[in-house]
């Protein structure tokens, strides 16, 4: 039922005019269908970002590149590779040099003493209990190992310091890290010689020394090449190299004697004296 908006008369729903007052009755609004709600857009799934591989450490990559250059047709490139690296490549190369230096001389002295003992005792030398021999030689070998490690470390840093000093005196602008990388790259040839010599020593005592000596000579040549190519000197690069190398040797001898290690020869000589 509907009601007139003017007089309030009740009337049917389909009446257009009020029967009492004649007021036009507004048609009732037709029921409208409910407009379906617009679908809510679902957020698109976000693809997970691909995992980014960790960048390789330049110290190891540059050091490995320098090592590979040693076995190339032009091993001098190892010095250039190491010297031009912005990372502290010398930490790895210098560490290898120091460690192998100590291991080589420890093994060489051990082989030398065994050979000497076998020569003294004839055929009985090969029948000596190696465990007892190790107990006898252990303290001497450990002292030699420690002494050689110290000497190699002093030599390495003395050579770096001497080179930097010469560069400063000759007014060559080169960073200390670059100098240390240069030295580390040059010593790679000696590192290879010490590693191979260490293995050869198990077969023949003095052959191992020969291999290590060849590696040492190669490192000297590589170091000279690195010095010559590193800067333009007002003097001959050979004189600059000799000044660096001589200063490094003198500093090493002084430091080793002050430390009471001699040149590592005190303990080595004492061990040899037992079997001469």
Image (cartoon, rainbow, N blue to C red):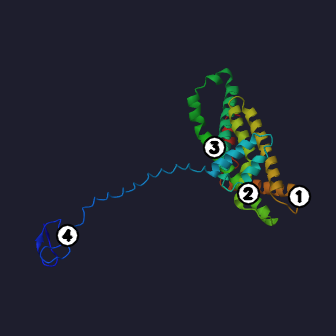
Query: Percent x, y for residue 155?
Result: 71, 52
Q: Secondary structure at mark 1?
A: loop
Q: Which mark is residue 16?
A: 4
Q: Residues within 10 Å of mark 2 (few under 14, many from 20)?
A: many
Quarter of the rendering occupied by the C terminus: top right
Q: Which residue is mark 2?
A: 179
Rounded to the nearest whole Å, what is the CA distance between mark 3 and mark 2?
Answer: 27 Å
Query: Percent x, y for residue 113?
Result: 67, 33
Q: Nearer the viewer, mark 3 or mark 4?
A: 4
Rounded to the nearest whole Å, what is the CA distance between mark 1 and mark 2?
Answer: 18 Å
Observer-nearest residue: 95 or 46?
46
Q: Which residue is mark 3?
A: 145
- The mark tally for this picture is 4
Instruction: Please indicate, yes or no, whether residue 223 appears anywhere in the rendered image.
Output: yes
Establish if 135 lies above or below 170: above
Q: Nearer the viewer, mark 3 or mark 1?
A: 1
Q: Secondary structure at mark 4?
A: loop
> Residue, x 22% and y 71% (percent of image)?
26
Rounded to the nearest whole Å, what is the CA distance between mark 3 and mark 1?
Answer: 38 Å
The answer to whether mark 3 and mark 1 are in CB contact below 8 A is no
Rounded to the nearest whole Å, what is the CA distance between mark 2 and mark 4?
Answer: 108 Å
Query: Percent x, y for residue 117?
Result: 67, 29
Rounded to the nearest whole Å, what is the CA distance between mark 4 and mark 1?
Answer: 122 Å
Q: Nearer the viewer, mark 2 or mark 4?
A: 4
Quarter of the rendering occupied by the N terminus: bottom left
Q: Nearer the viewer, mark 3 or mark 2?
A: 2
Q: Which mark is residue 236?
A: 1
Q: Which mark is residue 30?
A: none
Query: Percent x, y for residue 136?
Result: 58, 35
């Amino acid at each position: 039922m509907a009601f007139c908006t003017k007089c309030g008369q009740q009337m049917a729903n389909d009446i257009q005019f009020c029967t009492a007052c004649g007021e036009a009755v507004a048609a009732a609004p037709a029921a409208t269908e409910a407009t379906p709600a617009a679908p809510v857009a679902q957020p698109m799934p976000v693809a997970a970002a691909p995992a980014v591989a960790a960048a390789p450490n330049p110290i190891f990559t540059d050091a490995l590149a320098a090592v590979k250059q040693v076995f190339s047709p032009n091993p001098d490139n190892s010095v250039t590779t190491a010297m031009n690296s912005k990372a502290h490549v010398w930490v790895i190369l210098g560490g290898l040099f120091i460690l192998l230096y100590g291991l080589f001389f420890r093994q060489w002295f051990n082989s030398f003493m065994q050979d000497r003992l076998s020569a003294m005792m004839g055929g009985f030398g090969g029948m000596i209990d190696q465990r007892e021999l190790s107990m006898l030689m252990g303290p001497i070998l450990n002292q030699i190992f420690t002494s050689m490690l110290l000497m190699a470390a002093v030599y390495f840093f003395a050579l770096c310091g001497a080179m930097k000093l010469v560069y400063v005196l000759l007014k060559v602008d080169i960073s200390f890290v670059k100098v240390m990388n240069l030295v580390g790259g040059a010593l790679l040839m000696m590192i290879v010689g010490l590693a191979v010599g260490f293995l050869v020593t198990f077969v023949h005592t003095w052959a191992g020394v020969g291999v290590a000596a060849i590696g040492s000579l190669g490192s000297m040549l590589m170091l000279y090449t690195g010095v010559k190519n590193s800067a333009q000197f007002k003097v001959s690069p050979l004189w600059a190299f000799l000044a660096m190398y001589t200063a490094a040797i003198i500093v090493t001898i002084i430091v080793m004697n002050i430390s009471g290690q001699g040149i590592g020869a005190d303990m080595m000589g004492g061990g040899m004296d037992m079997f001469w």
